[in-house]
Image: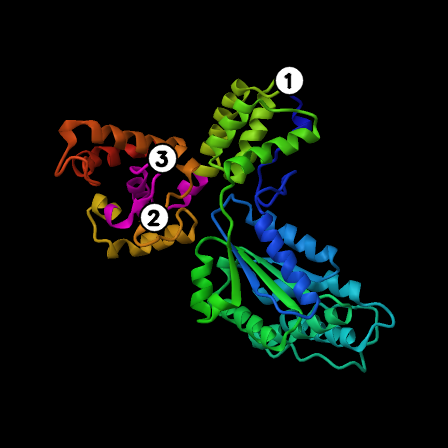
């Protein structure tokens, strides 16, 4: 079918035609906005999940909801090369320009003057001109050089200006796991102080599975400061809807068996649904989309993932991290026990802590629960390199010549045949 009209579009942060499976998070955000606007309090939010589950898309939709409600909105992405001070200041500029109209009230004038001082704290050369006279207005003082104090002053005055308009202030931070520890501490402190004053302000942070731990390490009261929402894979029914709704816009239907095939192959991960949907559409001759179209599209999609998405993740891993992933791959799509993984590698579990923590931070695994490590995501284990390792490991377990210890034990077949598997893997990974 025509690739120009293809409604599926895999990409980082690219909004899909149909955003499904996120009703709970969006409803929680909408309720928080309405509660704050009516003078009540509401918890700020933390969204966390693996890459490819749609956190950025969800955060952007939340920002749109706040803007549509008339709120002052700043949306930023944490970056290692840029401070949060710079990012927040520049993200607020457009909203401040919209506020600066002749005849505005004193709280808005105060917020504009404070914003100018905040701008001066990170940019001594540049300046903003809002087109209103601020010479006699109160405000300012957000240029002490202490990030927590300056950010707190800015957001406090801005939320006051928003209250004058009958709305609030929303700050949304993507990739929040990359915020420096000191900035995360400051952000938590600002939210805590705003809650105590009942300022009309809410913050939403999105990041990898390591984000809740980092927030908790920043402030001991963080578990009460935020409402935590997991952004996970879609259910089978939601995955089917994510395929059906975009096709309906183009008056195209899917066969039920085709939907089943793509939903199963994707594991419910939104990015993979878009990848397989796109490739299935492109190989299909005409509607309806058949199961054979889907099978070919899935194969094409996996090739694209193997040479791009998975390959890049694998190349980013260190040698120690690759060994750890190989040991996890023996378990296929099941959870891996961190103690068993250590035994397979012939190492002490404590000695592998830094490697395990690094994989979690890179979102190649999720944080363990009582010693269990979930697989990074089902499609990862179906990439050509890791799938090969998993299949070879299964063959080793079945070979009597490779058995050691108690048959069927978690380390059975690993130590004797693992050396060959580990030496050959370089040809395939």
The residue sitting at 62% across, 65% down in the picture is 202
Distance of mark 3 from mark 2, alpha carbons?
Answer: 16 Å
Q: Earlier in the sequence, mark 3 or mark 1?
A: 1
Across and down, in percent, residue 4 comes to 68, 27
Residue at left 51%, top 43%?
A: 52
Check the image and name the residue furthest to the right. 103
What's the magenta region? Answer: 311-340
Dot 3: what SS? helix
Q: Residues within 10 Å of mark 1 (few under 14, many from 20)?
A: some
Q: Are marks 3 and 2 in contact (CB under 8 Å)?
A: no
Distance CA(mark 3)–CA(mark 1): 35 Å
Residue 157 rendering spot, x and y as whole percentages: 69, 75
- Judging by the rendered image, the residue that carries numbered circle 3 is 386
- Distance from Cα at disc 1 to Cα at disc 2: 43 Å
Whether residues under marks 3 and 1 lie with C-beta atoms below 8 angstroms apart, the answer is no
Sequence-wise, the earlier of marks 1 and 2 is 1
Q: Nearer the viewer, mark 3 or mark 2?
A: 2
| Quadrant placement of the C terminus | top left
Q: Which quadrant holds residue 66?
A: bottom right
Front residue (pair 407, 310): 407
Numbered label attached to residue 286: 1
Residue 307 visible in the displayed image = no
Q: First in sequence: mark 3 or mark 2?
A: 2
Residue at the disc numbered 2: 373
């Amino acid at each position: 079918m025509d690739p120009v009209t293809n409604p599926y579009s895999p990409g980082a942060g690219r909004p899909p035609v149909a955003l499904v499976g996120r009703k709970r998070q969006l409803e929680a955000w909408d309720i928080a906005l309405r509660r704050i606007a009516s003078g009540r309090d509401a918890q700020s939010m933390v969204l966390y999940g693996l890459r490819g589950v749609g956190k950025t898309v969800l955060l952007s939709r939340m920002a749109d909801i706040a803007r549509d409600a008339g709120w002052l909105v700043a949306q930023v992405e944490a970056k290692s090369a840029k401070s949060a001070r710079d990012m927040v200041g520049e993200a607020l500029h457009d909203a401040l320009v919209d506020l600066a109209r002749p005849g505005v009230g004193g709280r808005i004038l105060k917020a504009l003057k404070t914003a100018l001082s905040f701008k001066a704290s990170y940019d001594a050369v540049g300046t903003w001109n809002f087109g209103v006279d601020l010479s006699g207005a109160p405000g300012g003082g957000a240029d002490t050089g202490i990030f927590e104090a300056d950010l707190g002053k800015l957001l406090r005055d801005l939320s006051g200006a928003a209250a004058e308009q009958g709305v609030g202030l929303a700050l949304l931070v993507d990739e929040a796991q990359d915020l420096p520890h000191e900035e995360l501490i400051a952000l938590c402190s600002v939210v805590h102080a705003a809650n105590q004053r009942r300022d009309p302000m809410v913050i939403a942070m999105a990041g990898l599975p390591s984000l809740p731990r980092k927030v908790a390490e920043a402030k001991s009261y963080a578990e009460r400061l935020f409402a935590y929402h997991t952004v996970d894979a879609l259910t089978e029914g939601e995955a089917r809807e994510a395929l059906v709704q975009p096709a309906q816009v183009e008056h195209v239907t899917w066969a039920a068996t085709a939907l089943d095939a793509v939903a199963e192959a994707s594991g419910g991960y939104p990015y993979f649904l878009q990848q397989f949907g796109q490739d299935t559409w492109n190989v299909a001759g005409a509607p309806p989309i058949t199961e054979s179209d889907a099978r070919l599209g899935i194969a094409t999609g996996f090739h694209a993932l193997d040479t791009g998405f998975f390959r890049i993740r694998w190349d980013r891993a260190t040698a120690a991290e690759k060994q750890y992933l190989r040991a996890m791959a023996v378990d296929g799509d099941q959870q891996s026990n961190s103690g068993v993984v250590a035994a397979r590698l012939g190492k002490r579990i404590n000695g592998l802590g830094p490697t395990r923590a690094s994989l979690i931070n890179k979102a190649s695994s999720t944080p363990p629960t009582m010693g269990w490590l979930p697989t990074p995501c089902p499609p990862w284990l179906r990439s050509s390199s890791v799938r090969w390792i998993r299949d070879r490991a299964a063959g080793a377990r079945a070979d009597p010549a490779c058995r050691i210890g108690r048959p069927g034990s978690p380390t059975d077949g690993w130590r004797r045949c693992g050396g060959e598997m580990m030496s050959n893997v370089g040809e395939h990974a």
